[in-house]
Amino acid sequence: MHQQGTSARQIRSSIAHTQDLLGDVTDLNILIRDAERAQRGYLLTGAPDYLAPYDAALQRLPALYDHLRHLVADDPRQQLQLTTLRSITQHKLAEMARTIALRTNAGEDAARAAVLTDVGRFLMSEITQTLKTITAEDNRRIAEQIAAIEQTDARLRELTAFGSVLAVLLLALAGLMLSRGAMRRRCLAQQIEQRRHGDLERSNTDLARQTAALERSNAELEDFAQIASHDLKEPLRGLSNNARFLQEDYAGKLDRDGVGRLMRLGYLCQRMERLIDDLLYFSRLGRQELGVQVTDLNAVICDIESMSETTLKECNASIVLPQALPLVSCDKVRITEVFRNLIVNAIKYNDSATKLIEVGYHDELTQGGVTRKQVFYVKDNGIGIAEEFHEDIFRIFKRLNAEDDEKKGTGVGLTFVRKIVERHGGRIWLQSAYGEGATFYFTIAQGAAYAS
Amino acid sequence: MHHEIGLRAILLVEDNVDDYEAALRSFKAAHLYNPVHWCQTGSDALNYLKHEGIYAQGPAHERPALVLLDLNMPGIDGRKVLSILKQDRALKRIPIIILTTSSDERDITQCYELGASTYIQKPVEFDGLIKAVGRIKDYWFGVALLPQA
């Protein structure tokens, strides 16, 4: 049958895919282990001959990665794993290169001291773990496919059974009306057969049509902000220019109030431009690929701390990390933006004499009966947020506090934060009451955090 | 315009009156004194360059030294004008500078593929526009050698 034909093809290509993937994973494992053995041999003996497998691994790895990337091109989860793998492997190779150079330049003792830090062994176990995850993920994919095929089969059997019963009934009916002749009987049986095919095919084409429509409307939505923003900017530029030219050309005729109003017009144009730029950036956040890499969040927080040193001092605020944060596979620039936004808010909406911002991590966190894994949080002792606004604060351009023109934001920080977290496959929520500080919690993709 | 010795004309293709005025003012502020011919639509620009339509009868004019071209215009838009000019044996040598609001990666790529010489995003701030025009002047009339008219 048509459906079974497709399924068989699917299985065949799936098996070929798995064989390729497993082959690559095994090769990769062997290559890295050979390289490590070569490195150890060299560290022990100092004889360059030992390094041949290490050099071979360095040469072959890029092609192997390319092939793997090609294999998982349509699987975002595996892509994330692969990026992680690549990043750790690069760390591992760099670590090997470093100890080899130490052995060559500074002798056996220096190299041994470097090896004893255990960094190499830790990275190796991370590599093994990621390879296992990739294999497990592939197994899961196959299991899913098999389940889907079994479901289709079951549905086909049902339809066939139903069709047969129907056929029997109709044939019996036809038998009663034998006088109508054998031609008509054959015709009916054919119709049933056709309908059985038709139902399945129709539901398939319906599904394909709906998917296509959804994809189209997504793309249109993404384009919308981009196009609208550009079209909005054109009259805005005209407004701003006209205000300025009026001020220049009629300088002698305008009194102070008139000049003041024109300057206000200029200010409002600038503000509008910032809003449009923010809208544009928001639409880009939804479109652009994430640049995923292994990220040390402790360094991220350190960077934010040193960048906002003056503000922290002026506001008498300090950032506290109760324990070290894990390494995470994520888009470093964007996740830095998430932490920076949350920290800036924690300082800004805070009237305590000593402002405390705690940045931390839970391997597992249970709240209101729900347990979530790998949860990050930013906690402050600020003014807090009344519960009725807990959803509002994430809305674009929504602001809760009135502020002076000079330091007035556009009200996009938390919208960007949520978008970034969601692009990473995570979610964000908060716990807070007015006057009692706030804690923002968020997750990134499951399995993204992999070492404390 | 052809009698302005030493200063060749610039063709400005821009549908928006405000942007046209801003451009003229910024030329003045940046001391760019070349005569400017303004076309408000893509088809008017093509007629001007090809001496067709309303320009078929009038006095002969030299080809401009530069074209400043807006992308988003009603009717024949900037992309189309660019593509037609770059396929014209006689006109394709004129450098075309795209001056547009769009910073869309697709527009930038497409314009360079079609043969644009430079792509500039219109600065919203007037001071930014003066600066940009100053650079255009320094480069195209200071550094670069231009083809014969």
Image: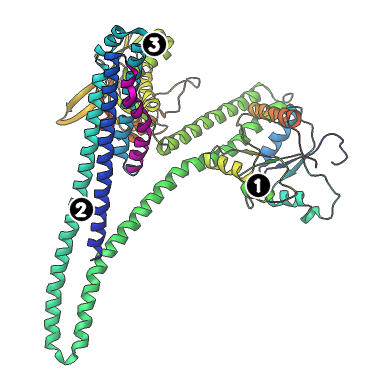
At 24% from the left and 33% from the top, the residue drawn is A131
Chain hosting mark 3: A
- Residue at numbered disc 3: A312
| Residue that label 1 marks | B82
State the residue in front, A233 or A417. Answer: A417
Question: Image height check: is B4 above or below A12?
Answer: above
Name above or below for residue A274 compared with residue B80: above
Magenta span: A47-72
Chain for mark 1? B
Q: Residue at x 46, y 44 (%)?
A: A223
Tell me the residue at 24%/71% (across/down): A195
Q: Amino acid at mark 3?
A: Leu
A62 in the magenta segment: yes
Circle 1 packing at 10 Å, graded few (<14), some (14-19), many (20+), is many
Quick check: can you spot residue A430?
no
Of residues A378 and A80, the one drawn nearer to the viewer in this rendering: A80
**In the image, is A352 to the left or to the right of A222?**
left
Tell me the CA gap for discs 1 and 2: 52 Å
- Quarter of the image for residue A137 reads top left
Q: Which mark is residue A148?
A: 2
Q: Position of residue A336 (x, y in %)?
A: 38, 23
A434 part of magenta stretch: no
Q: Position of residue B61 (x, y in %)?
A: 83, 46
Indicate the secondary structure of the residue bearing disc 1: helix
Q: CA distance from mark 1 to mark 3?
A: 53 Å
**N-terminal label among 3 and 2:** 2
Residues at badges 1 and 2 in contact (C-beta under 8 Å)? no
The kind of residue tagged 1 is Leu
- What is the total number of numbered labels drawn onto the structure image? 3
Q: Position of residue B27 (x, y in %)?
A: 73, 31
Q: Which numbered disc, 1 or 2, marks the residue closer to the eye?
A: 2
Please provide percent x and percent y for residue B134. 70, 27
